[in-house]
Image (cartoon, rainbow, N blue to C red):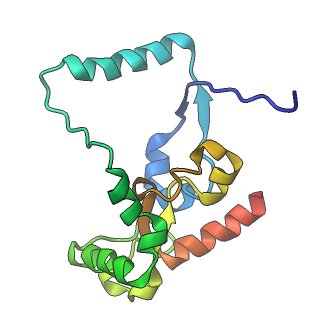
Amino acid sequence: MNSVFIVAPSKIIDPWSDIQNLGETLSNPLKLRIVDRSEAYDSIRLIRALDETTIDTEIRMELDYRLSEEWSYSQIDKLSKGNKIKNWAKKMDYSCPGTYCNHEKFENMKNLDIAFGHIIPQNWARTFPHNLSTVNHPDNLYLTCKNVIHNSLITSQLYY
């Protein structure tokens, strides 16, 4: 046997800090802590309780395969579809999630300066092949400025 693959339940150590520094966090691994069996079971019970509660919870259905292919990275990276999304983000008054540009509003950027980033980076998908089928899925994409993408590439080259 050449390798061993172990799956262990874990949690993010400092999720609030990671959310506030999203532009930097996406290019750096999250700090994780393996949870013990009782904490894992507590989490499972909480998830199952969502089914038994009267509280309204919204769970978005998985995208239809054709729709996910139509809006995958390879399709939206093309000029016409990509520009539709970028113009929509400008119209909705959205800002870049990264800190390199100080959360610049997309409406202040040229479309060429807005990029599509991957939440789970493409190089992670190559490292963990079970992610290859979903790495370019619309649920794994976000809008950002080219500064975040450029700095993420520099950081990932240092680690790989």
Does the rendering let one see residue 102? no
Give the left or right position of residue 30, taking residue 66 as reference: right
Looking at the image, the residue that sits furthest to the front is 66
Q: Residue at x 32, y 50 (%)?
A: 64
Q: Locate residue 147: give its quadrant.
A: bottom right
Residue under the image location 63 percent in, 48 percent down: 29
Query: Which residue is nearer to you in this view: 150 or 76?
Result: 76
In-image side of 43 versus 12 (left or right) = left
Residue 73 screen position, x and y as percent: 47, 66
Residue 27's x, y, as percent?
A: 60, 59
Q: Position of residue 97 (x, y in %)?
A: 41, 65
In the orientation shown, which residue stands out farthest toward the top?
38
Whether residue 70 sits left or right of residue 121 in the image: it is left
Tag count: 0
Residue 61 visible in the shown view:
yes
Quadrant location of the N terminus?
A: top right
Using the rendered view, name the quadrant where residue 10 is placed: top right
Q: Is residue 85 above or below residue 133?
A: below
Residue 42 against residue 131 in the figure, above or below = above
Q: Quadrant of residue 156?
A: bottom right
